[in-house]
Amino acid sequence: MANSKYEYVKSYEVGDEVFPPNLIVVRIGGRDFRTFSQVHEFEKPNDEAALNLMNSCAVSVSENFPDIVFCYGFSDEFSFVFKKTSKFHQRRASKVESIVASFFTSEYVSKWREFFPRKELRYPPLFRSRVIACATIEVLQSYLLWRQSTCHTRNLHNTCLWELVKDGKTESEALELLKGASKDEKNSLLFERFDINYQKLDALFRQGSCILKTEVMDIVKHNENGSPVKRLRKKLRILHSKNIAAGSFWNQHTSLKNELGSLTKDIGKVELDYLRSFHFGNKLMPSTWIVIRIDGCHFHRFTEVHEFVKPNDEQALNLMNSCAVAAMKEFRDIVFSYGVSDEYSFVLKDSQFCQRQASEMKELKCPPYFDGRAVCYPSSDILRDYLAWRQVDCHINNQYNTCFWELVKSGKSKSEAQNFLKGTQAVDKDGLLKQFGIDYNKLHVMYRQGSSIFWEKGDVITMNGNKASVEKSGEKVVVEHCNIIEPSFWRAHPTILY
């Protein structure tokens, strides 16, 4: 991180470590998945391909983050349980929850074609995420009982609802008929009216899916005579169990007992105090500027795998900008965005967004994912200093990277280039680049100053077939590459931070 006079803004970041011995659970859930499922014509009440896609994404998350030792999911949600000794991203809640949700979403988009080969993904799904801290294994047991009970209750209700709709009722009529109906009454309705024994429906729908590591005999090689050599290996398995909170299920799996602890007794209901804690979420301070900053995770590897141009890949940066524009159009509470390299900062003011609860053709060989954090700034002056800090970093880092890759191109190894640049100042780097025939100040302004995105009043061009029409006095999203450190930018755009 580059040093500058603006770095004091980091003091506004609030610590959110989940301290031991709390167990970390990350629950993700689809945002407006009802609309998503309608647009993509999912089968009702359950679409097996969609559920298998969710399971496959959860398996990928578990494979990529080995600290996750147990997962449970149904419908459009999944819960990921981390081992009790986990140090994953220093146990920072904002990092943990954003990374899991981002990776899951990225996998969902990447795997879509595998599960829906004849169906186009019209738009990417969105997932909320939250960290639940479970103080003991007994609290975790209650949490898992609660989620599986919710799975059963919702699935029984939805099975009744959609059978009634198939039978000729409107959705509102079916909902009215089911209002106040007990579990037994719903079971009777399915059996007597539709000849459906609920207990014989697919366990995937009734019980949800668990993912955990089990020991299996695996062939690791073959002897010279062709006979297989087997070893015990830990592999992820997808299971369906009637009661995942029961000791009979939990204690038979060594990995769960070793990494999380044993369950000493079965429970029949969720403790009310525990339930309140599962719903609890921190809120950001009111009447403050909110900055959501995202950063690419392991983007160095991602850029190498996908052979990005060094030190700057214009297409990759334009892709980042395009994603930021889409975010601003989707979430109109965002008034300004600033991005450089693999990071973006999104600014919101007086927003109740989510009740202030704290994407030449290349094959995508591994999905990108991002961590995120939310920070509150009490004044527009401090907010401008935050944005200045990010732009100062943009300049310092880009100047360094330009020098570094020019040295590598000239024949030095990466370690030699790093040692050569150690302790050099900005003027030294400018002189070095001139030796390579490069005037740093004439490089593409996007590389040197990053990208600023904001709403601006003006003519909006819309297309109707092959004809373009211009609508006056509309708002459009503008992408500019300019100096946001100097007051002149903010004077020229006084409505951004009004």
Image (cartoon, rainbow, N blue to C red):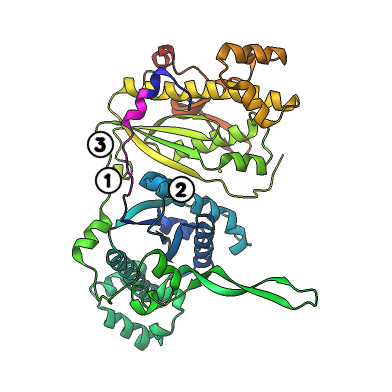
Where is mark 2, residue-wise?
99
For mark 2, give the secondary structure: helix
The extreme right residue here reads 225
Crowding at dot 1, Cα within 10 Å, few <14 / some 14-19 / many 20+, comes out as few
Circle 3: residue type: Met
Residue 36 drawn above or below residue 378: below
Which amino acid lies under the numbered mark 2 shown in the image of this protein?
Ile
Range covered by the magenta-colored residues: 8-19
Contact between labelled residues 2 and 1, with CB atoms less than 8 Å apart: no
Secondary structure under tag 1 reads: loop
Q: Nearer the viewer, residue 329 or 373?
A: 373
* Total numbered labels: 3
Task: Pick whichever of labels 1 and 2 is earlier in the sequence.
Answer: 2
- Classify mark 3: residues with Cα within 10 Å, few (<14), some (14-19) or many (20+): some
- Mark 2 surroundings: few (<14), some (14-19) or many (≥20) residues within 10 A: many
The reply, left or right, for residue 467 in relation to residue 41 is right
Q: Does the magenta stretch include residue 12?
A: yes
Q: Is residue 124 above or below residue 258?
A: above
- The residue that disc 1 covers is 282
Residue 11: percent from left, percent from top: 32, 29
